[in-house]
Image (spheres, rainbow, N blue to C red):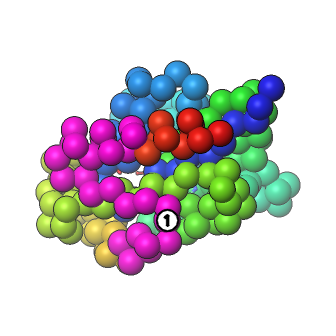
């Protein structure tokens, strides 16, 4: 069986990664999601093992020591997030494409590891103001977390050029059809 390849959606929080990922899963049954580990608490409706593996600080540190992560980063007031090697290998070895939802530094690291076996798409909000409005409307962040995420977004936007493609998420359907085409082309280019 042919080994799968890696697709990364990368963007500042609130730019539309989860929305795009959901659509991709609906349209492509050969893509699987890599469940990351995190030390942040679950949001309402999030399920352990499906959205994230929610770990304590001690558990996360133990996983680092055991070299279980392909990459990991710490942000948002000390919260850590990491891609589990076991998840990635399991999916790639069974011939599926894997979709990673990671922040910019993690994405740069993964792109470096997988090279041409990886398509990295940076999703850009039309403006920081729109990003703020969307995050407020999503209603999942308290005031302080919102501030931290927006502050970080400004820095993250400066990384856009380091990825294979940039898609501006202004009109949702337009942006998604661009992403859908990039992913189809990448798959057909095997
Ligand atoms: P991320 O996963 O990058 O944090 P989300 O996919 O959760 O971002 O999107 C943030 C919020 O913005 C969600 O409430 C989503 O429904 C909304 N959203 C995403 N894309 C658009 C768009 N093009 N126009 C308007 N709202 C959008
Ligand atoms: P959230 O708390 O909104 O779920 O995620 C916050 C940020 O963490 C997002 O930008 C998301 O892409 C990123 N993230 C999620 N999982 C990982 C991971 O395994 N590694 C890295 N580096 N970032 C991740």
- Position of residue 1 in the picture relative to residue 10 (left or right): right
Quarter of the image with the C terminus is: top right
Residue furthest to the front: 189
Quarter of the image with the N terminus is: top right
Q: Residue at x 41, y 70 (%)?
A: 160
Q: Bin the neighbour count of mark 1 within 10 Å (Cα to Cα): few under 14, some 14-19, many 20 and up.
A: some
- Position of residue 105 in the picture relative to residue 152 (left or right): right
Assess whether residue 59 is covered by the magenta stretch.
Answer: no
Q: Residue at x 25, y 52 (%)?
A: 169
Residue furthest to the right: 66
- Position of residue 169 in the picture relative to residue 7 (left or right): left
State which quadrant residue 12 falls in. Answer: bottom left
- Depth check: 98 or 187 in front? 187
Q: Residue at x 31, y 61 (%)?
A: 124
Q: Is residue 35 above or below residue 115?
A: above
Q: Position of residue 136 (x, y in %)?
A: 18, 53
Q: Residue at x 75, y 47 (%)?
A: 85
Q: Position of residue 163 (x, y in %)?
A: 49, 65
Q: Is residue 183 visible?
A: yes
Q: Which SS class for mark 1? A: loop
State which quadrant residue 32 falls in. Answer: top right
- Depth check: 152 or 97 in front? 97
Q: Position of residue 37 (x, y in %)?
A: 61, 47
Q: Is residue 72 visible?
A: no
Residue where numbered disc 1 is placed: 163
- Position of residue 103 in the picture relative to residue 149 (left or right): right
Region in magenta: 157-181
- Depth check: 29 or 47 in front? 29
Q: Position of residue 26 (x, y in %)?
A: 41, 23
Q: Is residue 129 above or below residue 31?
A: below
Q: Is residue 53 above or below residue 161?
A: above
Is the CB atom of the residue marked by disc 1 within 8 angstroms of ligand 2's nearest atom? no
């Amino acid at each position: 069986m042919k080994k799968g390849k890696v697709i990364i959606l990368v963007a500042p929080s609130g730019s539309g990664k989860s929305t795009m990922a959901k659509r991709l899963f609906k349209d492509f049954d050969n893509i699987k999601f890599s469940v990351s580990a995190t030390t942040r608490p679950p949001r309402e409706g999030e399920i352990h093992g499906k959205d994230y593996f929610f770990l304590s600080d001690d558990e996360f540190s133990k996983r680092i020591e055991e070299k279980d992560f392909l990459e990991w980063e710490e942000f948002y007031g000390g919260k850590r997030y990491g891609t589990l090697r076991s998840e990635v290998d399991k999916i790639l070895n069974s011939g599926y494409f894997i979709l990673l939802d990671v922040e910019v530094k993690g994405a740069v690291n993964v792109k470096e590891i997988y090279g041409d076996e990886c398509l990295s798409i940076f999703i850009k909000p039309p403006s920081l103001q729109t990003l703020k409005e969307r995050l407020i409307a999503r209603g999942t962040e308290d005031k302080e977390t919102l501030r931290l995420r927006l502050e970080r977004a400004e820095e993250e936007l400066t990384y856009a050029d380091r990825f294979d493609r940039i898609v501006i998420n202004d009109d949702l359907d337009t942006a998604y059809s661009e992403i859908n085409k990039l992913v189809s082309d990448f798959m057909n280019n095997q």
